[in-house]
Image (cartoon, rainbow, N blue to C red):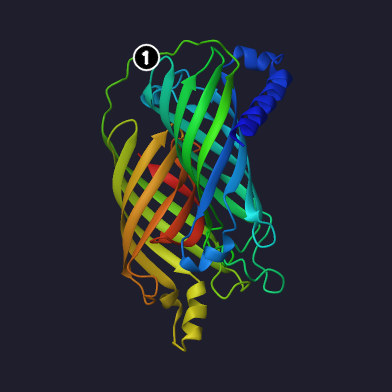
Amino acid sequence: MLKSVIKLLIFSQLLIIQHFAKAQLFKQNNYNIEANFHYGTFLKPQPSMGYLIKGHIPAFDLKFSKSTTGDKLWEQLYRYPETGFGLYFADFRNPQIIGNGFSVYQYIDIPIITSNIFCFSYNLSYGLAYISKKFDADNNFYNIAIGSNLNCYGGIALNCEITLTSKLNLISTLGYTHFSNGSISQPNLGLNVISCRLGLKYKFYNSFEKKNQIIPVFKRSNELIINYSCGYKSILPPESRKYFISSLSLNLQRLLNYKRSVGVGFDIFYDNSLSEKYKSKSIEYTNIYLFRSGLYLSHELFLGNTSIVTQFGGYIYQKYYENGDFYSRIGVRYKITKNISTNIFLKTHFASADCIEWGIGYHFN
């Protein structure tokens, strides 16, 4: 089995190299191409999902990346990471209920330890995924994990990269992959896969010079962000209507250095799905009952114009307590200009997805 996998990887790599080797674009820049075979298993968020697991999961991905050189300050701060996009395919070993998974994603690979022949790094990825089989009340009611074909894709991995030749590296990885739709459709327990990976990376260059510019002294400062987000969510039972949600957030943060900030914030949430829950429990309500407010702590990790945002907060006003007193967000923010940003956040109550928020923010520096 292992020999067959290695032969398949080498063969696919040679085909790709043959196709691109004459392209002047790859000769002049720091591009890489990588192919990986995955072998893993589902992690069960709930014992009730055990019957969905039919065997170990084979998967394959193809990555296109560029090695950064330090042209931008953040590249040097993160030890010259690789950035790129990938294509992913997985056979979930349950063709009738779950089917297969396909995804297109962006990623960044950040070195932790490097040498001339070895690199240990961590990888963060996010994108869109297509799951070929979803819940259907008439034809596929056994799929309690995924309620939509189109889903979000997210992953985190630890990579070990060993130099074989001046252009070819061996990749060994332990990774976690998550698929869900953020409660846009129900059910949404999600699919979680942990896997070991083996691959080859081909570099379209022999070597390149990494810039090592002098890092200017960072002057700490404060920033106020006003952010408005909105979206849709669904609630159980499956295939129910979708409800409008929105939030207004004020976030005061302290910029600590070029890489991160910490802060505090205040949220006002509107959730129209609460009306259905009040009705189901015969609770009289007014429009104010559809609002919640909360306070939160925030952390932002800057990767150039893109940043990874995490927030953890608690409700200070709510009339519906089924979800508990705490909430969290994780997501990506992109700076369009110095003062304007866009974002996509996943809001959760502990490990349960509440909604996906699409937003725009204004930054007062």
- Examine the image and state in which quarter residue 89 appears: top right
Q: Quadrant of the C terminus?
A: top left
Query: Compared to 269, does 102 lie above or below?
Result: above
Q: State the SS at label 1.
A: loop
Residue 146 image offset from top left, x and y in percent: 59, 62
What residue is shown at x 68% (from left), y 59% (from top)?
Answer: 133
Give the labeled residue for mark 1: 213
The one of 289 and 43 positioned closer to us in this rendering: 43
Residue 355 image offset from top left, x and y in percent: 50, 61
The one of 91 and 277 positioned closer to us in this rendering: 91
Amino acid type at image mark 1: Gln
In-image side of 116 versus 257 (left or right): right
Q: Quadrant of the N terminus?
A: top right
Query: Compared to 200, does 245 lie above or below?
Result: below
Report the number of discs.
1
Residue 13 image offset from top left, x and y in percent: 66, 25
In-image side of 304 versus 7 (left or right): left
Q: Can see residue 188?
A: no
Q: Can see residue 273?
A: yes
Residue 287 image offset from top left, x and y in percent: 46, 77
Task: Please rate how many residues cluster around mark 1, counting C-alpha atoms within 10 Å: few if below 14, some from 14 to 19, many from 20.
Answer: few
